[in-house]
Amino acid sequence: MSYKMNRRMSSFAALTQCGLFFALMSVLFPANSAQANEGMKATQTLTSLSLDAAQLAANTALKHCQKKGALVAVAMVDRSGIPLVMVRDALAGMHTPETATRKAWTAVSFKTSSAEMAKATTYNQPSSGIRGVSNVAMIAGGLVIQASGSIIGGIGVSGAPNGEMDDECAKAGIASIQDAIDLN
């Protein structure tokens, strides 16, 4: 018997043994029975920030910062951290769009403000390794947006002279859509 034929036969034997194992397991533990599916919910409904609300919040945050003399970018992300809107002052630094997006993503991903994440991940803290995760921005300016206790999106502001002003502008953006969120 040739090597190739011997190898094919042993592969066939292994597959046959696996097949017998899975056949026995399906008899002992029926996965497709009505019993296994009883009470299972097969779909779910998720609420996420609308594009209209994201645009309003972003523009409000931008204008709030401009009134204070800050040249910023504002990013809005949905509940999954996917960007919805990006607005920036024409004179904002080139780093601000990406940083704003990362701040919003960080807030949504970790379900807390980017300022809180900055505190929780400082050097020698148990969570300091999180700073190495791609796309995070551990600096103030990223906030979650919630509806009835569930995160529906996030906002990130970057470019103000300090993180506290970035947060202030982000809060102004959220405030501009809060009534509409509360009505839903």
Image: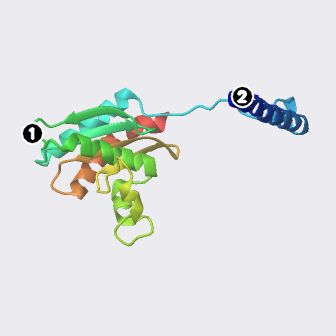
Q: Position of residue 52 (x, y in %)?
A: 35, 27
Q: Residue furthest front?
A: 1
Q: Residue at x 19, y 57 (%)?
A: 162
Q: Is 15 located above or below residue 113 in the figure?
A: above
Q: Amino acid at mark 1?
A: Leu
Q: Is residue 146 left or right of residue 138?
A: right
Q: Amino acid at mark 2?
A: Ser
Q: Position of residue 145 (x, y in %)?
A: 41, 44
Q: Residue furthest bottom?
A: 124
Does any portion of residue 159 appear in the rendered image?
yes
Label 2 residue SS: loop
Does any portion of residue 175 appear in the rendered image?
no
Instruction: Tally the marks.
Output: 2
Q: Nearer the viewer, mark 2 or mark 1?
A: 2
Label 1 residue SS: loop
Mark 2 Cα-neighbour bin, 10 Å: few <14, some 14–19, many ≥20: few
Mark 1 Cα-neighbour bin, 10 Å: few <14, some 14–19, many ≥20: few
Closest to the observer, 7 or 95: 7
Closest to the observer, 10 or 3: 3
Q: Label 1: which residue?
A: 91
Q: Label 2: which residue?
A: 2
Q: Residue at x 38, y 72 (%)?
A: 124
State which quarter of the image contains the N terminus.
top right
